[in-house]
Amino acid sequence: MLTENAYDLLVVGAGVFGLTTALEMKRRGYRVAVIDPGPLPHPLAASTDISKIVRMEYGSDEAYMELAEQAYQGWLQWNEMLGETLFHDVGVTMLTRAPMSPGEFEYESYHLLRKRGHTPERLTEDTITHRFPAWKAGAFVDGFFHAQGGYAESGRVIAALARLTQTQGVDLYPGQKVEALLKENQHVQGVRTYTGSTFHAEHIVVASGAWSSLLVPDLTHFVKATGHPVFHLKPTDPNLFTPPNFVVFTADIGRTGWYGFPLHPREGVIKIGNHGVGQVLHPEQDERVVISSDIEQLRTFLAATFPALQDAPIVSTRRCLYVDTPDGDFWIDRHPQCAGLTVATGDSGHGFKFAPVLGGLIADAVEGKPNRWLPKFHWRNVSWHTGKKEASRYKGER
């Protein structure tokens, strides 16, 4: 039964998947609302941080590179549309401790970039030291710099998108945490929140990140939340870590997991994180804390890579939550058994860079429209019981 809280589309979750969906569906003429526990940006959401990498490099995976190329253009357009520089196009370095070799992430990325008409600059031990003096001389001997890429100020992006949804006529309900989906005869018709409110809609999109499987238990076979350490450090020599002397980087990522960012223009810190197998966490019951062994590993990495940061104060830490799928691909599809329900999750640590194109992908899934990318992200018969994500298969970073 319809109530005063009745919509064409109800989006559960105001992260990057949810807000971009709401904006696109509103543009297509639907009456849309977004529900989120709040505040926005939510402090525990994966989208909330000072920065996320925006890059095209995906090894030999040409489909992701092409999608990332479209997203890159979208970020440039968003800077204009939103009237502020939220995407910093400072470039990306991907360096290796040994010469790049066929089959490795950096080698395949470099050659695929060239195949697709990009002009990454190959680096040597000498040019690395000359161009980027913060890197320890001789520690890295190969890799490349790609000028098209950088980082987005992710928390500020979410805040800007939340404001935009309201100016575009989307109803935004922060402070409403969904307790359950309302179903009748395997048809999802709305949600009930912990405040006792009910919201009804013709279609529901669950885009709740790590919380998605709590609302859609079927997802527990296909996704899991993993926590990965992130550090913010205060450099004693900020100029050494400011573009163009220092840009977004990966440091032999397939072997070490380390990646990071230049000095943040507002926060005055260097963000460095580690992408790996991660620590399996419950989104509500487990603490998301960085432990002493994480810090020890960071200090060892810094000593071998960025000596000027070896003793830099750590001003804050967080354990960023990914929603991993076994194959590392997103999970964007209508539920196969429940009518009126679409799921948009499975960021696998690399979703934010696609923000400008996510809304279109998810909206096409909702409407059942053909989309060349959606078969890659469909509801598929792969689970953590039948297969596992390869730790060396690099797709993500936060």
Image: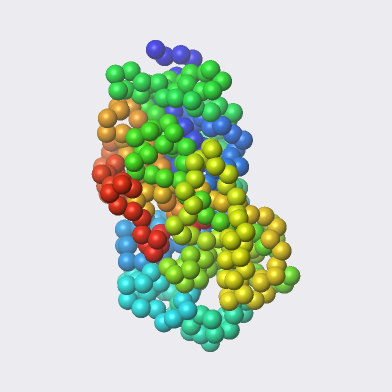
Residue 234 lies, with reference to residue 354, above or below; the image says below
Q: Is residue 273 visible?
A: yes
What residue occupies the far right of the structure in this picture? Answer: 236
Front position in the image: 196 or 286: 286
Q: Position of residue 42 (x, y in %)?
A: 58, 39
Front position in the image: 344 or 385: 385
Q: Position of residue 18 (x, y in %)?
A: 46, 38
Residue 219 lies, with reference to residue 253, above or below; the image says above
Count of marks placed on residues: 0
- How is this picture coloured? rainbow
Residue 339 lies, with reference to residue 61, above or below; the image says above
Horizontally, residue 105 falls left or right of residue 38, namely: left
Front position in the image: 356 or 3: 3
Horizontally, residue 285 falls left or right of residue 395, namely: right
Q: Residue at x 46, y 53 (%)?
A: 349
Q: Quadrant of the N terminus?
A: top left
Q: Is residue 264 visible?
A: no
Q: Residue at x 59, y 71 (%)?
A: 300
Q: Position of residue 283 (x, y in %)?
A: 51, 40
Q: Position of residue 258 (x, y in %)?
A: 52, 66
Residue 92 lies, with reference to residue 22, above or below; the image says below
What residue occupies the far front of the structure in this picture? Answer: 293
Q: Quadrant of residue 316?
A: bottom right
Q: Residue at x 53, y 32 (%)?
A: 36
Q: Residue at x 38, y 69 (%)?
A: 105
